[in-house]
Image (cartoon, rainbow, N blue to C red):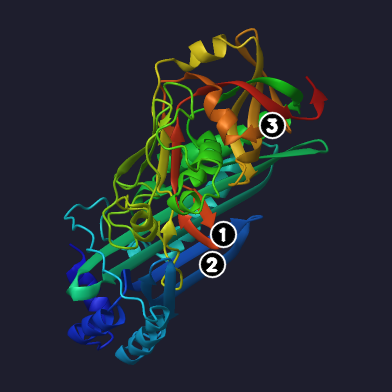
Amino acid sequence: MSLPQTDKLFFDQTGMDRALVERLVGRALVGADDGELFLEYNQSESMVWDDGKLKSASFNTTQGFGLRAVAGETVGYAHAVDLSEAAIKRAAETVQAVRGGYAGTLALPPQGTNRHLYDDTNPLPSKSFEDKVQLLQAIDAYIRSRDPRVHQVSVSLGATWQAVQIIGAGGWRAADIRPLVRLHVAVVARQGDRMESGACGGGGRLDYARYFDPAQWGRMADEALRKALVNLDAIDSPAGEMTVVLGPGWPAVMLHEAVGHGLEGDFNRKKTSAFSGLMGQQIAAQGVTIVDDGAMDKRRGSLTIDDEGTPSQCTTLIEDGVLVRYMQDRLNARLMGVKSTGNGRRESFACQPYPRMTNTVMRNGSHSKDEIIASVKKGIYAADFGGGQVDITSGKFVFSATEAYEIGNGKIGRPIKGASLVGTGFEALKHMTMIGNDCELDGGVGTCGKNGQSVPVGIGQPTVRLEQMTVGGAAVG
């Protein structure tokens, strides 16, 4: 349990009286339906090696609190960087104003957990500044030595150590300490006047040791370089309606954006999601099962408890093609008459929690990758994705492939560039005619944005055949 460690940060070091703080929270929530005090201490660092030198390095420490009172659908929220009883008292007076004459029934606190999905260890001091710079330099030198076509190398390393404590009415408390590290490698290769890029990254809720292992960072460096060199030989992508095969792992970013956001509780309570009102209906092809699993060991999107104190869990969203559940925080779950799924997340103490994804994964099917590729007469294989745009209300999306290949007569052919996938979440789900047995999780670099907030997330999927999709490209298919 992290309560003793976080008590040192939030009470012993600040001089605040815990009993008094608990009474202030209790008074702030009289007549409310829900609410909590969210205390946070955060250390973070990042450094970027670019163009043969250390381009930037930063270290930051923040602390503060956010106090929330919920009355019906109305939320009163106040936050401050001042961890003091006086500041919390002022915040309590502010959030009480949302209640007016409202007399709600305060929700029961989340059920506790003794589970730990990651260690409390702070990764930042585990390696010296000199060691970190030497790592970035070594990766740069290694990549440049691999191929004379390497034009530019960019390597970034970062970590955070976040301690949180959540206090509810009646002295209910929960706490969590969350380490997070990330290493990302990007390569630009040049051949004549043509330049192409490739990237690879990794991370999770652990310390730096894994990514200081030459076998680990060497694999990432090789992969980033391989992608850049493949793209140097890429031809223009065909365009038109065709079969698309998505590779395992990171291509699940399309699933995250085009489907995952539409299954978050707030969008469905407000009926602004393309999936609103479809609970219990067949919205995807048979065999499609999608879960949001915040309880994976040491994964980037994992949480022992969410930012409302609810233990994370594995929530099945779509089962064998049928919509069975949405992701919920406490507010939207209460208003929809269901239980929170442990998906209440916020970027920091300055932000209100909303229902957000953790690790969103499509389960395995029964087909091998080779079998899926062999089934395609003409199409493309999208092995990696970059950015994309999604309209939650309509479900329409556009995604750009950063590594893709032709498929002809059941075989992967030449690499292609400029391929973009256009469609809707509904179409994509219903056109999944073959699902692979090779599910992979992404390397651990994903970040999700919503309502101006960013949180770390994970994604994963097996190889998937989409029977019919619109592919945008430079050539006519």
First in residue order: circle 1 vs circle 3: 1
Q: Secondary structure at mark 1?
A: strand
Can see residue 243? yes
For this rendering, which residue is in front, 429 or 302? Answer: 429
Identify residue type, mark 1: Val
Q: Secondary structure at mark 3?
A: helix
Q: In the rendered view, would you say 328 is above or below 461? A: below
| Residue receiving disc 3 | 231
Distance between mark 3 and mark 2 Cα atoms: 31 Å
Quadrant position of the N terminus in the picture: bottom left
For this rendering, which residue is in front, 53 or 21? Answer: 21
Residue 139, image x and y in percent? 53, 47
Can see residue 205? no
Does 90 sit left or right of 191 as displayed? left
**Residue 359 occupies quadrant:** top left
Residue 264, image x and y in percent? 45, 48
Q: Nearer the viewer, mark 3 or mark 2?
A: 3
| Residue receiving disc 2 | 57
| Residue receiving disc 1 | 48
Considering every residue shown, the one lying at the far bottom of the view is 86
First in residue order: circle 3 vs circle 2: 2
